[in-house]
Image (cartoon, grey):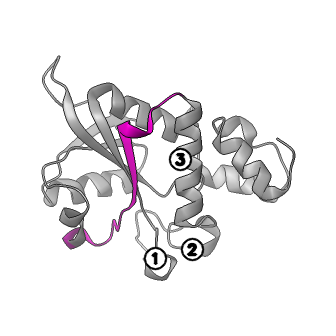
Amino acid sequence: MSGPAPGARLGLIAVTGRFQPFHRDHLDLVQQALAIADRALIGVTNADAAALRRHPASPHRHLPSANPYSFEQRRQLIDAALSTAGIAAARYEIVPFPLDEPERWPAIVRPGTPQLVRVFSDWEREKIRRFAAAGYPPQVLTGDMGSRVSGADIRVAMHGQQPWQHWVPPGARELMQSWQGEAP
């Protein structure tokens, strides 16, 4: 990971994602962010269903089927997972983040705030490009495709009534089960 000098601690770092749903790789990303910063701003992208945009590096991210959870539901999932993992609410803030509208970012997060991004594909490389161009220095983690958890895989498994629970951290998992009418 590129980032602060060894031993240096950041005050704030940001992570962004659609979190459709929030899964164990997302939890790990937030935990890694909090390992190098006092606080994390968790930006939920595609928060406004009316503002979804297609992008060639991620051709599914704008589709309704790829965005089944509202911002409020995702906020609840993230909060439940972090709380269950023992992360104090004072260490993070969950906000809508209009990834396709960089002109709005300064009202949400101070320019210069590092953005932690785990790279698996061209889409994450595009996010890195956007953040760097707008003055938000990317802190880059290399993702392992062999162990990657995908929200799309979780949604497919849920739709096909296949096991998905192992991909979702405690707290979020039970909340999703309650929304499905399942017993936790």
The residue that label 2 is drawn on is 63
- Is any atom of residue 140 visible in this view? yes
**Amino acid found under the numbered disc labelled 2:** Leu
Asked if the residue at tag 1 contacts the one at tag 2, i.e. Cβ–Cβ closer than 8 Å, the answer is yes
Q: Say if 134 sits above or below 139 in the image.
A: below
Question: Is residue 91 highlighted in magenta?
Answer: yes
**Amino acid found under the numbered disc labelled 1:** Leu
Q: Quadrant of residue 173?
A: top right
Mark identifier at residue 31: none
Which residue lies at the image location 20% right of the left edge and 35% below the top edge?
11
Q: How many marks?
A: 3
The residue that label 1 is drawn on is 52
Q: Position of residue 48 (x, y in %)?
A: 46, 74
Label 1 or label 3, whichever lies nearer to me, is 3
Q: Earlier in the sequence, mark 2 or mark 1?
A: 1
Q: Say if 42 sits above or below 57 in the image.
A: above
The residues tagged by marks 2 and 1 sit, at their Cα atoms, a distance apart of 8 Å
Q: Say if 84 sits above or below 149 in the image.
A: above
The residues tagged by marks 1 and 3 sit, at their Cα atoms, a distance apart of 21 Å
Bin the neighbour count of mark 2 within 10 Å (Cα to Cα): few under 14, some 14-19, many 20 and up: few
**Amino acid found under the numbered disc labelled 3:** Ile
